[in-house]
Image (cartoon, rainbow, N blue to C red):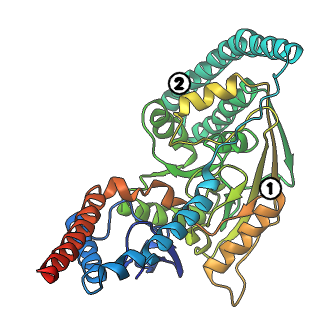
Amino acid sequence: MHLTNEIKGQSFGLPGLTGVDTHVSNNKGSDDLVLREEPVKTDAEIENLYTTAEHQRLGHNSLLVDVLNISNNLTDGASAMVDDSFNKCFTSMNPEPWNWNVYLYLCWILGCFIRYCVLFPVRFVVLFICFNSLVGMFLFVDIFAPRARRTRIERKLVQLMCSSWVMAWHGVIRYHGPKPIPGTNRIWVSNHTSMIDYVVLCSYAPFAVIMQLHHGWIAFLQKRVLSSLGCLWFNRTEVQDRHVVAERMRQHVHQSDPIPLLIFPEGTCVNNEYTVMFKRGAFDLGATVCPIAIKYNKIFVDAFWNSRREAFGRHLLRLLTSWALVCDVYFLEPQSIGPNETPQQFAERVQKMIAKYANLRIAPWDGYLKYYNLGQRHPGLIEKRRRVFADALKRHLGDEEGGRR
């Protein structure tokens, strides 16, 4: 017996559970949803199913059979190996130490002094002046500029804001391929490493983007500034949000002269060494898909944002105190779905193109599994398991004492 989550035809083992089947629907209304934050069943139902399955497994065998039966342990071990291959997609690079002798250590100290005491203050002051001036100009234009010219000016100001961030990071960005041109029935998709992906792309050409809604000062920029580009925001834990965004996405694509719409179909940040499964929602619109491959050079800084371990402010600080941000952006040939090709096959074909140019390894996992923690969702399962084994052991010991009498 083995717990499987069947997600779009794929099976994923979860450690510690046996004999319980859960299923996620695969209808069209949930194309972008592969694994929900909310459990399909309630905590009590899942724990009862688990307890029943364990009682059935342990209730009809002798003590010797139960002791020698290692299938459950093998299942947990195999699930742990699967979990390890999944976690590799979200592991930050640990730089190898090179300051292991006296003269290299002195060079490292000098480099830290230059980065933190010279480059960082200069970058911060320049960024503070430029970015806040552009935000002030944006708010002024938003209030007083005529509607006919307002949109064009706001888009240019947003592009300059993104350029100020790239300048503060000492960005060395090389763009390959034709510059994106707005057009009807077109959509741009890219691999995703950090929220700075959008900054890097928007500093070259303005994009409307579909992105998770954040909090704090980021939410202010999303709702007040980036809304001028027609950006769409959603909460990944709200199914209804994704349905509304999917409909607005279709409307945006079919406008007569829309700003280029950018989507990160992985749905989460990956470490720029792997690429996880593309959601098929962007490939089910009947639109021409324009792939974008982003590859960061980690020689100076790792651009991956591990949101589970690092706040975005700390991530920006790490970029501001690095030597430079080096990146290659490839605008690839537009692709259309084939006559006998399903949206999922189309998504996989585009993913292979991006992985080839960005030198990424394809992992067949859904990125939303990153936000699913079985122990946090069902903390009572561990205690339930202990009780089941304790009851089975007491029952066997009681039977042996009764036989001796």
Q: Secondary structure at mark 2?
A: helix
Marks 2, 1: nearer the viewer? 1
Residue appearing at x 66%, y 16% in the figure: 124
Q: Nearer the viewer, residue 288 or 155?
A: 288
Q: Residues within 10 Å of mark 2 (few under 14, many from 20)?
A: few
Quarter occupied by the C terminus: bottom left
Type of amino acid under label 2 = Phe
Q: Pinpoint residue 105: horizontal percent, then vertical percent.
A: 82, 16
Quarter occupied by the N terminus: bottom left
Q: Which residue is mark 2?
A: 140
Q: Pinpoint residue 252: horizontal percent, then vertical percent.
A: 56, 61
Q: Is residue 385 above or below residue 128?
A: below
The alpha-carbon separation of the residues under discs 2 and 1 comes to 40 Å
Residue appearing at x 73%, y 76% in the figure: 336
Q: Secondary structure at mark 1?
A: helix
Q: Nearer the viewer, residue 53 or 177?
A: 53
In the displayed structure image, the side of residue 250 where residue 389 appears, left or right: left
In the displayed structure image, the side of residue 103 where residue 373 appears, left or right: left
Q: Nearer the viewer, residue 361 or 160?
A: 361
Residue 265 seen in the figure? no
In the displayed structure image, the side of residue 365 where residue 189 appears, left or right: right
Q: Is residue 358 above or below residue 66?
A: above
Circles 2 and 1, Cβ within 8 Å, touching? The answer is no
Q: Which residue is mark 1?
A: 358
In the displayed structure image, the side of residue 291 where residue 365 appears, left or right: left
Type of amino acid under label 1 = Ala
Q: Pinpoint residue 340: horizontal percent, then vertical percent.
A: 69, 90
Q: Nearer the viewer, residue 271 or 353?
A: 271
For marks 2 and 1 on the same chain, the one whose residue lies earlier in the sequence: 2
